[in-house]
Image: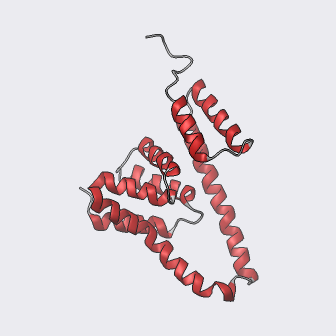
Amino acid sequence: MTGLWKLYALFFKMGIFTFGGGYAMLPILKGEAVEKQKWITEEELLNYYSIGQCTPGIIAVNAASFIGYKLRGISGLIAATLGVISPSLTVIIMVAALLGQYMDNQYVQWAFGGIRISVIALIISTVIDMWKKNIKDVRGYIIFAVAAILLWYFNMSAVTIVIIAAACGFIPDLRSKKQ
């Protein structure tokens, strides 16, 4: 059984090194929770991210909450959630206190520019990895294409797209054998 302190500490560590929001946390969470600790499977992680996208709040916090709850119930949920938000809360308080003084500094602007670019690379790497492991059949490609079109061309809500994709998941694979 995973201890509460370990849950808090690992999610605190993930929170420290996550710049760019919940999607940027995905590769770190995958490395720690799926590969290293083996707390959850990659499929469970993707499910948590999917549910986290549809529920109110921050995706990374929702995913941490789901994992904590799975491992230790309500106390695990609280430990993981507090762990993942503690670094951000601390940094936000410090940045808010200093923001007015340094935001116009060219070096600070350059640093943020570099951070944003590296976050994009992390997200693209994770998306490619998820693509390879999760789109396995014609139905998957169709669901992806429809979701992308609804998002990019019709600016449809992510929640609506996820609900439509979930419904499409019930459609049998076009190549599946008759039962």
State the residue at coordinates (53%, 50%): 53
Which is nearer the eye, 46 or 143?
A: 143
State the residue at coordinates (61%, 53%): 123
Which is nearer the eye, 75 or 29?
A: 75
Q: Residue furthest left?
A: 1
Q: Residue furthest bottom?
A: 101
User: Could you tell me residue 24's position as x and y percent?
Assistant: 57, 58
150 to the left or right of 53:
right
Q: Say how many tags the image has.
A: 0
Which is nearer the eye, 14 or 49?
A: 49
Above or below residue 93? Residue 1 is above
Can you tell which quarter of the image residue 118 is in?
Answer: bottom right
Above or below residue 176? Residue 148 is below
Which quadrant would the N terminus be assigned to in this image?
A: bottom left
State the residue at coordinates (38%, 53%): 66
User: Could you tell me residue 112's position as x and y percent?
Assistant: 68, 72
> What colour scheme does the image use?
secondary structure
Above or below residue 32? Residue 145 is above
User: Could you tell me residue 105's position as x and y percent?
Assistant: 73, 84
36 to the left or right of 140:
left
User: Could you tell me residue 115's position as x and y percent?
Assistant: 65, 68
Which quadrant would the C terminus be assigned to in this image?
A: top left
Can you tell which quarter of the image residue 84 is in?
Answer: bottom left
